Image (tube, grey):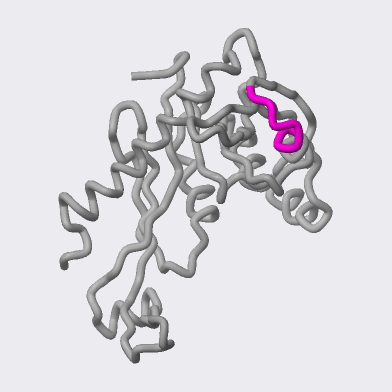
Amino acid sequence: RRWHGHRLFGHDSSLVRLPNTEELAQEFGLIEVTNQQGATGTSYPQGRISVLYDLLNQIGVDARLESSRVGEVLVAIEQAAHVPVGDLVINDRGFTGFRYLAEHVHRGVHVVGRCSSGSFLAAQELFRLNRAGRSVITRLHAPKEQRAELQRLGLPLVLTVRFVSLRLPDDKLEVLVTTLLEEREYPTEEFSDLYHRRWGHETFYNRLKSRLDLENF
């Protein structure tokens, strides 16, 4: 199954409690258990599972198990190598930074990502207007503190992207950033249903942890 000819992939991760052994503690590090009174004296190893997930066909394409101290964005960037050129990745707010977008543009992979109200200036303006159904194409320039590293990696310093605004069922405004620039081919009104398909990634992790009892080692 495809959307406008693209396979749809999700980037996301979930934290996994691992068996409490010395070897795993050394490899993954320990998480201290706390409650309202502070530390409980209990700890356990915790990993981060990151799955590149085919949202329409319900297939885990690539899976990684890392220390929970490894950032999910870094893992997702590495997993982008498994996304075919021309296909589309959908991600939540925590991923949508300039480096993440630049990595995917460089690989020829399209992105649809949710923006926070404090992210790119164009997104901030759409949140300020608080009107759904808006579509704005603009250029993003790499932050000064990232330019040297982006140049070292051979990544673009300027990106042309599109911001679209949507109204959620709870009446809140949502702003997405995408590399799908053509309004005629990718109408703004289709992005609400498109982004909702990301929920299949959340239910995939729920199946792993609940139905398949992943953490019951």
Query: Do we see residue 154 in this rendering?
Result: no
Q: In this view, does 146 lie to the left or right of 28?
A: right
Quadrant in the rendering for residue 98? top right
Quadrant in the rendering for residue 123? top right
Name the residue: 51% across, 43% down: 92
Q: Quadrant of the N terminus?
A: top left
Name the residue: 43% across, 67% down: 68
Residue 153 on image: x %, y %: 68, 50
Q: Who is closer to the viewer here, 110 or 208?
A: 208
Q: Who is closer to the viewer here, 97 or 170?
A: 170
Q: Is residue 129 magenta?
A: yes
Q: Which residue lies furthest to the bottom in this view?
A: 41
Q: Does the magenta stretch include residue 109?
A: no
Q: Who is closer to the viewer here, 111 or 151?
A: 111
Q: Quadrant of the C terminus?
A: bottom left
Above or below residue 177? Residue 118 is below
Q: Is residue 159 left or right of residue 193?
A: right
Name the residue: 70% across, 37% down: 127
Residue 173 on image: x %, y %: 61, 34
Q: Which residue lies furthest to the right in this view?
A: 144
Q: In this picture, which residue range is highlighted in magenta?
A: 126-132
Query: Do we see residue 70 in this rendering?
Result: yes
Residue 166 on image: x %, y %: 59, 27
